[in-house]
Image: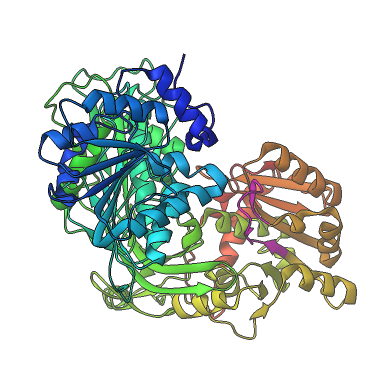
Amino acid sequence: MSLLPRTAEEFSSAEYWERFFKKRGEKAFEWYGDYNKLCGVLHKYIKPRDKVLVVGCGNSELSEQLYDVGYRHLTNIDISETVVNHMNQRNVERRPDLTFHQVDATQTPYEDGSYQASLDKGTLDAMASEEEGALAGRMLTEVGRVLAVGGRYVCVTLAQESVIRLAVEHFVGVGWAVRLHCLGDPESEASSFALPVFVLICTKFRVAPPTPILEMCQGEDGAAARLVQVADLLSAVKERQAYAILRQRLRAGTDATSSPSLTLCHAPTGRPRYTLTVQDCCPGAKVPKANHFAIFIVPQGRETDWLYGSKEGRGQLAASANFRRLVVVAMHRDQEYTDMQAVQSELSPMVMELAPPGMPANQQVPFLSVGGELGWREVVSRGVSELSGEFTVEDVRGEDGELYRRLVFLKNAGLIQSESRLFRPEASVRRKKNRKKVKAAAPPPVSSPSQAPGGVLSVDSGYLCCAHHKVMVAGLTVLGVGTAQNKDAPVSVLLVGLGGGGLPQFLRDFVPDASVEVVELDPAILEVAQGWFGFRPDDRLKVTLGDGLEHIRTLERDGARSCDVVMFDVDSKDSTLGMSCPPPAFVETSFLEKVRNLLTPRGVFMLNLVCRDSALRKSVLERVRGVFPSVLSRGIEGEVNEVLLCSQADCAPLLPASLAQAAKSLQGALSLNSTGRTVKPQIDIAEMLEDLKVA
């Protein structure tokens, strides 16, 4: 029968502990480790000459062992009469000065400031669940009363969030210094606890410091890292606990379908530095006998690539590497990394603990990378949107060696909100001079410059980085753009969702006689698009700041205009819905009917749909098909995105008979931009339509 409590509340009841020790009998109960595990940190903060109050001593041998090495001023208290009688009888002859008293730790008979240290091994954890922490709070207040100035409360704890928050906030509130040592993970697989053991040291000051003193140490002798606020200390604790839990999960091995991960923080700042994702090989895979374990370093700025950022991609990467276990390591923005050797040295002590079970001792573990480089990333701007939170604009080097600019919202740092390709204007000028027969001009200069390897950079407006944007442009074939019968027909586009502005700028620059109106809810996004992504509104490219839902309702109600194309490329702020694009209100039947009413007879509605919930996706498609007789779909390889092309006319005949000719016509139309200069946009219309199908 287990002697551990069934519920957390039992820990704090006198009845539970009385029953516990009667059942336990003579055997000592070493709560969270014995003397050998704790002695290093205890000797550091408690001196043999100190008067020490041991709260909730139980029948642990810790006080006896401290006594035997010279600590002769120990007062042990416990709420259990049984354990107190037993411990006094056990020590009456061998340790006559070691005393045990039945005392409630929340109301002791000792004088103010009469002790130099108070030792607590598990008692805080046991009491914190009672009365929503009020009982533990009274104990901490009593400890503070009996300790002298300069005295220390030394608490051995599992540091569960509610417990450690209660203690730290209490002592910070009364002006004490707080330091936390993480003693590491349980050494034995048979350990009762999966979490690491911490030792909390709170030091009483005569006068409270002007700012809280909060420190975190790794191991008993680790350097103290100063933290700014309580939340930072709690985050550092959770990081160590997550690491311990991951280690426990990995001891027995994982299957290829799971990809456990955790984030390692920079000790001095507490900010994320590395994210580790563990990928095991598929069962039955033919892995060379020596290939137990490897570490793969993802180049900076490439962590969102499909190969590294998706579960399927990492599975493919692991299969290609052909190791039993591969740890994929992503580096974080706002951190500095010297070189591959420095990263390897920094990671080695941590990642080696994640090795698969059965790996031979002293096995050499390789660090893998792309070309042996760390990649390159430069944050060129950062800001805060009232609607979307913190964001960053950063330049990175892609897999193809080209440089790209990205907009990333930090609350969803694994998702690229917008992306554009960069080029060096001076390089384009040199190419022009070397090609005298070529009349083509370089793409117009379009962005705020950024210093990067090789010089100043600008945004290439003729290149669409997002595959779904390319599909939307290719979808103009349904409209008949570029065909002989529509040669001089103007095209009016209403786009909800600006992002970096790459799609509307492309439409304005390369679709003949196109006029584009963009509706954007967030003013901060417009500033970013104009300042960093080369977005240039003019008489044919207008921006309306406001709610896209309300704008479309107003247009439809007033009957003021008709559109040839309506595009939705707007994300949802609620990540719990299973559909991240668009927000649900944009695909309600009543609203889709308003969109249909805005379209000209030849008009097309284009929807970027990102839906991971199969039942919800089915429901959205049913609603769209209920409003539009013809719905074509094009999925994006390696992504969840799919683009729906919706029309009131029957588009089925375009599949596949007239599709090739329509694509060719549109491709030709796009090659002549609005200035009359021959500038080829970098898009293959036929390729974008290859997998188009009836939804």
Q: Is residue 687 left or right of residue 614?
A: left
- Name the dominant secondary structure of the magenta segment: loop
Nearer to the camera, 460 or 190: 190
Span colored in magenta: 566-582
Indicate whether 526 appears above or below 167. Answer: below
Whole-percent x and y of residue 475? 65, 56
Residue at x 89% of width, y 77% of height: 558
Whole-percent x and y of residue 327? 30, 37
Q: Is residue 267 visible to us here?
A: no
Per the image, is 279 magenta? no
Residue at x 83% of width, y 76% of height: 561
Nearer to the camera, 640 or 391: 391
Q: Is residue 288 left or right of residue 546?
A: left
Q: Is residue 183 left or right of residue 642?
A: left
Quadrant of res 173: bottom left
Indicate whether 72 appears above or below 288. Answer: below
Indicate whether 14 appears above or below 592. Answer: above
Q: Is residue 389 visible to us here?
A: yes
Per the image, is 570 magenta? yes
Whole-percent x and y of residue 401? 29, 57
Nearer to the camera, 277 or 283: 277
Residue at x 38% of width, y 28% of height: 249
